[in-house]
Image (spheres, rainbow, N blue to C red):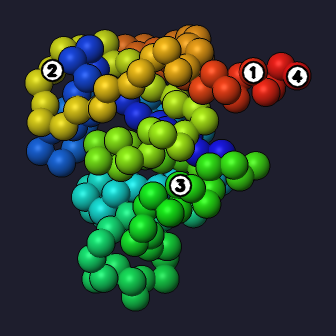
Amino acid sequence: MLTIIVARNQRGVIGKDGWMPWHVPGDLQFFKAMTLHHQVVFGRVTFNGFKKPLPHRDTFVVTTRTDLDARTDIQVIHDFIQFCQAHQADEAEIFIAGGAAIYAQALPYVTRMLISEIDNDRDGDTFFPDVESDDFHQRVFFSGDGFKVIEYKRKEQAKESTK
């Protein structure tokens, strides 16, 4: 199962100058708790912001470049659409963790999204893509200081899980 995990603010901003334009400790703790001991997929630019793989996660990096191929601490994905198609029905949850182009490519294949709504309207240069909300059931999943997490579950999946 593919799950998008993202923090965005009231303007839909997810980044500025290569990083998040806010610091919300509770949201960072939520991200860690959700992704720990899972597979996490980053675009190359987003991964470069971390500078190294996050501990206790299998890290995948999407890139068309070959300069990361020799690394042994990550797995490189050169064809992200093929990866999504191959893993969209997996039983294990794989988290898609950015950036904007990766989210946009993953949207047709994800079963679930965990979107942290950050309580600010800061400006940025990177935005979460538009989502057809009619395709998803929504509910408040978690509330914290300065943010709340909305879970989006694809409607086809929700129907199947009620059978």
Residue of label 2: 122
Q: Which of marks 3 and 2 is nearer the N terminus?
A: 3
Quarter location, residue 46: bottom left
- The x, y position of residue 44, in whole percent, is 30, 62
Residue of label 1: 159
Q: Which amino acid does label 3 sit on?
A: Cys
Could you say whether the residue bearing mark 4 is in a helix, strand or loop? loop
Name the residue located 88 percent from the left edge and 22 percent from the top edge.
163
Rounded to the nearest angstrom, the CA distance separating label 3 from label 4 is: 25 Å
The label nearer to you, 1 versus 2, is: 1
Could you say whether the residue bearing mark 1 is in a helix, strand or loop? helix
Q: What residue type is labelled 2?
A: Arg
Does 75 appear above or below 36? below
Residue of label 3: 84
Rounded to the nearest angstrom, the CA distance separating label 1 from label 2 is: 37 Å
Quarter location, residue 103: top left
Q: Which amino acid does label 4 sit on?
A: Lys
Residue of label 4: 163
- The x, y position of residue 114, in whole percent, is 51, 29
Name the residue located 44 percent from the left edge and 45 percent from the top edge.
106
Q: Which amino acid does label 1 sit on?
A: Lys
Depth check: give the residue in front, 65 or 157. 157
Q: Are marks 4 and 1 in contact (CB under 8 Å)?
A: yes
